[in-house]
């Protein structure tokens, strides 16, 4: 779509003037690769009894929903990255310059130039999926995770590796799925765990 390339070229011509900022955004976006930041946060929560269910919910959501997008949906749609399209030829030099591989394993570059398909943005899906679940669980404490999820998605647009519609669709899908997962998790917690806790308390009160 021509308007999407207009946006990407505007970003390229107006927002990439400071190389330090470009590098910082690239470093930031690495934490969204393979949902690293979300899995790490969830694993920490597993050790906090109050938030254990939240941690389990995040992990399962990342595996099932974000995994569905990355390994099933994206290959089915098979939309090429914008910098690989003929119209986006002018974007290639920036992407290749900024995406130096973090390290090399068995001769394969890790976290180098993105080589998967474009639609939907994995960073956007996982960011809004996890961010929404965190936010709905406790809006006052966990709103920064929602902001982080949005920034993760926008970083991919800044780095020219996704079309704007990849980001927008990822945000919408992630937010919808995150809302559904939150209410499902709350329902399971209320109907399968809460009654058990009430029974234990009832027994303890009878003994006391």
Image: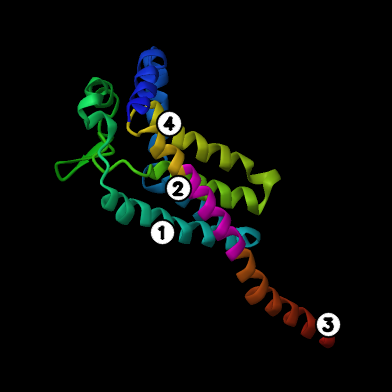
Left or right: 139, with 15 as reference point: right
Question: How far is the residue under mark 2 from the one under mark 4?
Answer: 13 Å
Q: Earlier in the sequence, mark 1 or mark 4?
A: 1
| First in sequence: mark 2 vs mark 4 | 2
> Tags 1 and 2 in contact by the CB under 8 Å rule?
no
Q: Mark number for residue 205?
A: 3
Quarter holding residue 122: top left
Question: Which mark's residue is nearer the viewer, 1 or 3?
Answer: 1
Element at label 1: helix
- Residue 182 magenta-highlighted: yes
For disc 2, the marked residue is 126
* Residue under pointer 4: 155
Dot 3 alpha-carbon crowd within 10 angstroms: few under 14, some 14 to 19, many 20 or more? few
Q: Specify which label sits upstream in the sequence, 1 or 2.
A: 1
Q: Quarter of the image containing the C terminus?
A: bottom right
| Residue that label 1 marks | 63
> Disc 1 and disc 4: Cα gap in Å?
22 Å
- Measured in 3D between alpha carbons, the distance from the residue under mark 2 to the one under mark 3, in whole angstroms, is 44 Å
Question: Could you tell me what secondary structure mostly forms the magenta stretch?
Answer: helix
Q: Which residues are magenta?
A: 171-184
**Is 25 on the left or on the right of 86, as rendered?**
right
From where the camera sits, is residue 37 visible?
A: no
Are the residues flagged by discs 2 and 3 in contact, CB closer than 8 Å? no
Coordinates of residue 199 in the picture (x, y in percent): 74, 82
The percent position of residue 58, horizontal first and vertical second, equals: 51, 56
Q: Is residue 197 in the magenta section?
A: no
Please give the label number shown on residue 38.
Answer: none
**Residue shown at the point (63%, 45%) measured from the top left:** 142
């Amino acid at each position: 779509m021509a308007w999407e390339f207009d946006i990407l070229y505007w970003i390229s011509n107006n927002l990439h003037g400071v190389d330090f900022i470009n590098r910082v955004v690239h470093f930031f976006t690495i934490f969204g690769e393979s949902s690293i930041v979300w899995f790490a946060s969830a694993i920490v929560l597993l050790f906090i009894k109050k938030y254990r269910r939240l941690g389990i919910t995040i992990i399962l959501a990342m595996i099932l929903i974000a995994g569905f997008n990355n390994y099933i949906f994206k290959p089915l749609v098979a939309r090429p990255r914008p910098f690989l399209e003929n119209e986006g030829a002018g974007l290639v030099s920036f992407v290749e310059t900024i995406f130096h591989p973090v390290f090399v394993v068995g001769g394969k570059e890790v976290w180098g130039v993105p080589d998967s398909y474009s639609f939907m943005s994995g960073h956007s899906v996982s960011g809004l999926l996890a961010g929404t679940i965190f936010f709905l669980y406790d809006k006052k404490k966990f709103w920064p995770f929602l902001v982080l999820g949005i920034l993760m998605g926008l970083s991919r647009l800044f780095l020219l590796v996704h079309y704007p519609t990849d980001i927008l669709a990822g945000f919408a899908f992630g937010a919808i799925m995150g809302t559904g997962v939150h209410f499902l998790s709350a329902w399971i917690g209320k109907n399968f765990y809460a009654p058990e806790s009430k029974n234990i308390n009832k027994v303890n009160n009878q003994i006391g």
